[in-house]
Image (cartoon, rainbow, N blue to C red):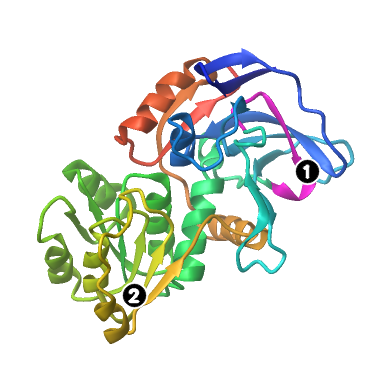
Amino acid sequence: MRACVLTQEGLSVASVPDPQPAANHVVVAVRTAGLNRRDHWITVGKYPGVQLPVVLGSDGCGVMEAEGHALDGQRVVIDPSMSWDATTDTQGSDYQILGMPLQGTLAERIAVPAGNVHAAPRHCSDAEAAALPLAGITAWRATAKRAAVRSGQHVLVTGIGGGVATFAVQIAKAMGCKVWVTSSKTANLERAAQVLGTDGGALYTEADWAKQIQSQAGHIDAVIDGAGGPGFNNCLGIVRPGGTIAVYGATAGAVPTMNLHRVFWKHITIAGSTMGSPQDMADWLAFVNDHQIRPVVDSEYMLSNTAQAFARLASSEQFGNIIVRIAE
């Protein structure tokens, strides 16, 4: 079968052996796969424990090939989380994500545990369905579970444009929240308002962006942040007393000097979050179906043009999710 393989020499589309399913595993013929920032960090060697060669990709939509399985012959999406802790509070010590070191979804076929496949939402296209798993479950856990946002709240989502941030806005809006966003690009703020219905925003490249958000929103109950870095203290300043900041990433690096006085004086809850449990995945897909959420697809590429898809990912110019079509 054909697959996108990362080796010491780089990224290429090559022929690899078909997967041989272990006990309690099923095979999915992949139609579409989604790219995530994780894939980029692996290709540039900045992801922990990189093991090569590897077939990349964590997100996928395809057709089940498992005779006797309830979903045999049906369109499914794949949960990329493997070996989540049984308590569901955190990932376990054996936790892995599809796409490294395990074979990923940028291949014509993949074998996964039977419990990791779910019926694809009928209202979503193949491209939209492929975008749902990794970024969607990450946004769901951070927004719905860790920040526990609820109707009527004011929410700030930082770094709009990426898949997780885009989903976080959709989740909060569907819950009945008002949502503000930040970006380094005016075009992203404008598109967020047009496509996602955000209530305002500011460029985080401007020194007074936090004051701009406060003047627009009045107050912020919860912040969904994947950046960290020097701007994190602005999040501490902008969230209301008793508010919550859910942190799912640190693309801007470590926080140089955290203002702990704000944390304890304002009774701020800082909630770490990453990926999600099997129950989170089930809850996320139920929410998608209940609210008819359609992921924002930035662009689509054929498997033979995967290098262009990764170049788009590396540029950080996308708004929404980048999709690779496996079937020509």
Quarter-of-image position of residue 284: bottom right
Query: What's the residue type where badge 2 is placed?
Result: Gln
Q: Nearer the viewer, residue 56 or 265?
A: 265
Label 1 sits on residue: 71
x and y percentages locating residue 12 in the rendered image: 53, 16
Give the secondary structure at mark 1.
loop
The magenta stretch spans which residues?
105-117
The residue mark sitting in front, 1 or 2, is: 2
Q: Residue shown at 41%/54% (left/top)? A: 249
Q: What x and y, as percent, mark residue 172? A: 40, 64
Looking at the image, can residue 94 be seen?
A: yes
Task: Give the residue displayed 62% in from the left and 32% down from the top.
Answer: 105
Q: Decide whether residue 111 is among the magenta residues.
A: yes
**Residue 80 appearing in the image:** no
Give the percent coordinates (x, y) of residue 226. Answer: 37, 55
Give the CA separation, mark 1 to mark 2.
38 Å
Q: Classify the position of the N terminus by image quarter.
A: top right
Q: Residue at x 33, y 56 (%)?
A: 254
Q: Which of 133/210 is in front?
A: 210
Which tag, 1 or 2, sits closer to the chain's start?
1
Q: Secondary structure at mark 2?
A: loop
Q: Amino acid at mark 1?
A: Leu
As drawn, the label of residue 20 is: none
Screen quadrant of the C terminus: top right
- Mark 1, Cα crowd under 10 Å, few <14 / some 14-19 / many 20+, is some
Question: Where does the image place residue 221, in percent across and percent down from the top left?
Answer: 32, 75
